[in-house]
Amino acid sequence: MNAASLPAGPDVGDTPAMPADAVEVGRVMGAWGIKGGIKVKPFAADPQALFASKRWFVQPPETPGPRGPKAALLPTLLKVLSAKEQGDGVVATAHELPDRNAAEALQGARIFVSRASFPTPDEGEFYWVDLIGLAVFNRQGVALGDVVGLIETGPHCVLRIQPAEAAAPEVLIPFVDAYVDSVDLPGRRIAVDWDAEDAA
């Protein structure tokens, strides 16, 4: 079980409105080069989500610092001209960023992509965004909690599960076949081979 690969999608439409299904996929680390390029840090080890569309929607940081980008000055949409992996990030150029000054103004900005642009994953592959919020049950039918996030460890991902009791600690279950029996996206449910006592 792993994350699906996302090839580059087509650029469609010109409206800058944030889509209802927008998914945050990365953050601008700073300018790249002298011609308006930016470097983006993907939120997943696999940066392919940034290649799912040539339309990147932009939002300011949740808590902008004194040197962070001003919301009023940020473009709401970047029409990506090129994007490629470089080191631990993705470097890209966009129509709205004509020079380095424009690129530097985006440092710290959040990048979103429409979920509808993601292609259908292969059998046994799932997008992280689709797993968030699913209820997790073990083989005895005991509810362990809901998925609140995932951790990328390198070899595999780990599910972060928050029990119903708010004060209870998170349960961490490796997202591998040895522990995950099935994922039912329509039913919003994940079945796992995990002892409830281990979740206590």
Image (spheres, grey):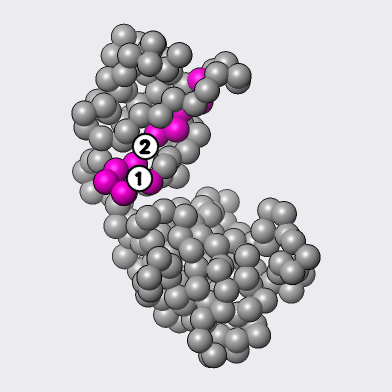
To which quarter of the image does residue 71 belong?
bottom right
Q: Are marks 2 and 1 in contact (CB under 8 Å)?
A: yes
Horizontal and vertical percent for residue 189?
38, 26
For image coordinates 31% across by 49% down, the residue present is: 154
| Residue 158 - label | 2
Q: Secondary structure at mark 2?
A: strand
Residue numbers of the magenta segment: 152-163
Measure the alpha-carbon separation of dots 2 and 1.
7 Å
Q: Is residue 135 above or below residue 9?
A: above
| Residue 47 in which image quadrant | bottom left
The residue shown at (35%, 11%) is 141
Can you identify the residue that label 1 sits on? 153
Residue 161: percent from left, percent from top = 46, 28
In the picture, the quarter occupied by the N terminus is top left
Q: Earlier in the sequence, mark 2 or mark 1?
A: 1
Q: Amino acid at mark 2?
A: Val
